[in-house]
Amino acid sequence: MTAPTSPAPLVRFAPSPTGYLHIGNARPALINALFARARGGRFLLRLDDTDRERSTAAFAEAIEEDLGWLGIVPDLFARQSDRVALYDAAAERLRAAGRLYPCYETAEELERRRKRQLGRGLPPIYDRAALSLTPEQRAAYEAEGRRPHWRFKLDHRNVGWNDLVRGPAHVDCASLSDPVLIRADGSYLYTLPSVVDDAEMGITHVIRGEDHVTNTGVQVQIFEALGAPVPVFGHHNLLTTADGEGLSKRLGHLSLRSLRAAGYEPAAVRALAVLTGSAEAVRPVASLDELAGLVDLAHISRAPARFDPHELDGLNARLIHAMPYAEAADRLAALGVPAEGAEPFWLAVRANLGRVAEAAAWWRVVAGPVEPVRAEADAEVTEAAAATLPPEPWGPETWKVWTAAVRERTGRKGKALFMPLRLALTGLDHGPDLAGLLPLIGRERAARRLAGETA
């Protein structure tokens, strides 16, 4: 990672509570949280809930739950809806400085003007016509019932910064329309509250997706107009699907809530969200501290971070195959696996699982009832197996000793020996190593299944 900064960084994640977080949102949330974690800094969750119509308490609660599932516990929390007085004061300062001016065009008028500019081969940027309005013209608009929206007057210059990801970066603000900061209904768009909060809260680093690069050019000018220190910026690549499709809240199957409901491990989602599109190979990383040590902003690719959702399956399985019993114990209990025998059961079946919940099916194989599968051609194997069942107690070596005795009696070996036993004992032609399952099935159930009884 890059060298530690001084003082310790304060970073933020500022989602809008207008929908559920998806795996693409997890990328900036995790990168920020891990950046702070690796440097002894702090992480702020700030809800951008100034859109009163679309923001809901349910979505706000879901955001906190989803971040908690990922292992992100914010050090600080704020809602922008609680901070409107600060934005009002900042807007007044910008008006007084001549940087915020009222505009009365309707959306239809602006669209017609944009089309005219495009037809003349001109860039479709706002022409600042509102700056030429006389007080009488403004009063006439007000009398019509029009209420102004307010634009920030940009300096037509290049704004440059040293980006944590992209290196030297700049935005030519002469190529941009003066941005609307306040809607006609008086509500704030994202831009001004974000700057005011970053300045007032002391955010040191703003790390976000590359789709915000142009916003950064605008926001730097607002920081400067308010006399506030400008934070360090970093713009990472965006997570996309394998075919390059951008992620949005409409992709419900990739929401963090749906991934959790589908049985994916948070560590698998974290690894995919963070390591895709970086210099590090995407691999299971169980520890947040270890993952934080792998995040190097300077080594994030400039290309889109393409991922295949099915890659989660492989990551998830690899994590489960290495998962210690202590980590799985409570979840096994919730699946109905009794504490007695749960640890050897977990060690026997985990290598065959893609999700922890799949262990329930294998516990049903152990505890029954199981309908054995027996072929006439294999009768000699099951009969010999029944005749040579060793006395209990059974342990890890029982399977090896027992099958050696059956082989001695029948001359069968390999698949011809093991498959009839598996079908009789489990009713399935696949599954975990029977050396681990057999002691859990026990002698009584094994004998009944070998005899063709459902047990």
Image (cartoon, rainbow, N blue to C red):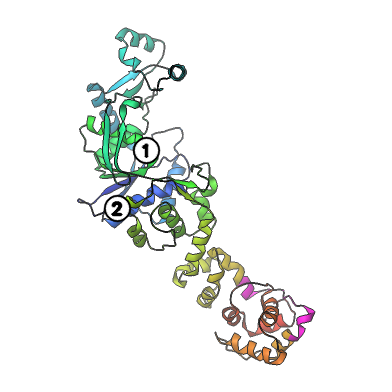
Q: Nearer the viewer, residue 47 or 319?
A: 319
Which range is magenta? 363-380
The residue drawn where x is 35% and y is 15% is 129
Per the rendering, the mark at residue 212 is: 1
Name which residue lies at 60% across and 72% down. 363
Q: How many marks?
A: 2
Instruction: Locate the N terminus by quadrant.
Output: bottom left
Q: Residue most toward the front? A: 121
Query: Is residue 28 in view?
Result: yes
Foreground: 119 or 312?
Answer: 119
Can you give x and y, in whole percent of width and height, for residue 10 in the image?
A: 27, 48
Per the image, label 1 sits on a secondary structure element best described as helix
Q: Work out whether 343 lies above or below 383.
A: above
User: CA separation, marks 2 and 1?
Assistant: 20 Å
Q: Which residue is mark 2?
A: 36
Residue 193 placement, left or right of 341? left
Residue positioned most to the right: 376
Residue 84 seen:
no
Q: Position of residue 31 (x, y in %)?
A: 36, 51
| Nearer-N-terminus badge (2/1) | 2
Under circle 2, the secondary element is helix
Give the amino acid at mark 2: Ala
